[in-house]
Image: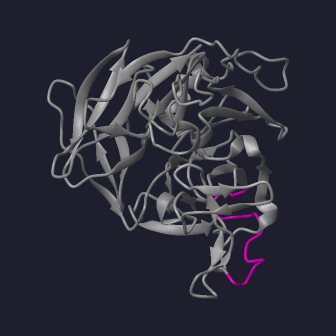
Amino acid sequence: MLLRAGLAVAAVAAAGLGAAVAQGDGDGPRPLRPDAQWTTVFKVPAGGGIEGLTADRRGDLYTAGRAPAGAPCPVFRIRDGVSAVVGNLAAPCGPAGLAFGPDGRLYVTNSDHIDVLKPDAASPPTATLFASGVPGANGVAWDKDGSLWVSDGGTAQGRVWRIGRDKVATEVFRVQPLANTVLPGGVGRDVRGLPPGEITITDTSRQASNTLGSQHIVANGLAFGRDGTLYVADTARGAIWRVYLDGHGRVRSPMGCDTTFTPDTLCLDDVWVQHPYLEGADGIVLDGDDNVYAAANERNAVTVVTRRGEVREFFRNGLAASRLRDEGPLEFPTSPVLVGRKLCLTSSDGARRDNFPNAPGEGAKVSCVG
């Protein structure tokens, strides 16, 4: 999902976001100890779920809850470990990423559109429509000119849109999908997570035994660097794309190399880094030194990519007695936010790979370290 979402979060940076959670030697933050103490600051009410996370100028955290069918989706503020509902999205709703805009209002991706509200714990408002035409809207980030950038997430087409002051969503580029549509079943690759995918393991082979677990999201979390470069998390490839833009938000990076995809598709040379540590990369956030923190959801881990492009394991759940990594403190982490010297994360508790089965642990929550 997110984030270094422009102006509002940049104000938090002034209060210390530029300092890495675990100070390093000038070349990126040091990894956390395996026994690092994560503090749960919010647990999702029964029957709900969360994915996105952001912070305001004060350093309060905000997340949009997912609700049972037919119910509105609450927006929570988390202050000093105490939560309050500060707004709602009308049903039906499916919030993901969220970010404060330069006007101080909170913008939330909601299925195929963007909703906006001004948080108010005393009288929680119902969000209103800001912009539509963004199917699968997931990650969000604000640029320096006050335009909102949105990724298409689960549709797996890799689209990234820019929404300007006219509130019109314009497709700017696409991250290359895993497969084209030249043949009915696609030409490319199918990446699967085990579980829920399964394979039959023998001494001589490992073959698929079901068709579950496909992961095709290639444009997920978005974040801008200090120089205006846009970084995009590629969940399926375990990669971070780096997209250079001009002063008008137009793509300077190469596009259109593979004519089996749309002409605005990024070339594979635009992949900045790809690494197994980044498998499941979901939301991302940059610190003041342009180090990228990525929530590697299916690995129950946080990965750091230094500004020099070095990929490091920052934290991963340790093994439980079961030899699984599903007991926390991370439980399918999705959205990282830096507030001062703290790193905070949502855990959506999805039942996939290292978080399968998802019965152990606390469930969907927000937790912080540092």
Residue 293: image location, x then y, percent: 66, 34
Can you see residue 239? yes
Q: Nearer the viewer, residue 286 or 296?
A: 296
Give the image quarter of residue 217: bottom right
Of residues 227 and 149, the one drawn nearer to the viewer in this rendering = 149
**In the foreground, 173 or 192:** 192
Question: Which quarter of the figure has residue 291?
Answer: top right
Report the magenta stretch's main SS: loop
Query: Where in the figure is residue 266, as x and y percent of width and height?
Result: 71, 68
The reply to whether the magenta stretch includes residue 349 is no
168 to the left or right of 67:
right
Residue at (61% x, 59% y) in the render: 218
Residue 354 percent coordinates (x, y): 58, 38
Residue 249 shows up from this direction: no
Q: What stretch is highlighted in magenta?
A: 244-260
In the image shown, does 219 or 46 lie closer to the viewer?
A: 46
Residue 346 position within the rendered picture, expressed as x and y whole percent measured from the top left: 46, 32
Against 15, residue 349 (above or below) is below
- Magenta region includes residue 253: yes
Q: Looking at this view, name the residue that lies furthest to the bottom.
A: 183
The quarter of the rendered structure image containing the C terminus is: top right
- Residue at position x 40%, y 17% in the image: 41
Vertical placement of 69 versus 29: above or below?
below
Instruction: Give the image quarter of residue 172.
Output: bottom right
Query: How many labels sit on residues?
Result: 0
Q: In the rendered view, would you say 6 is above or below 196? A: above
In this figure, which colouring scheme has been used for the structure? one colour
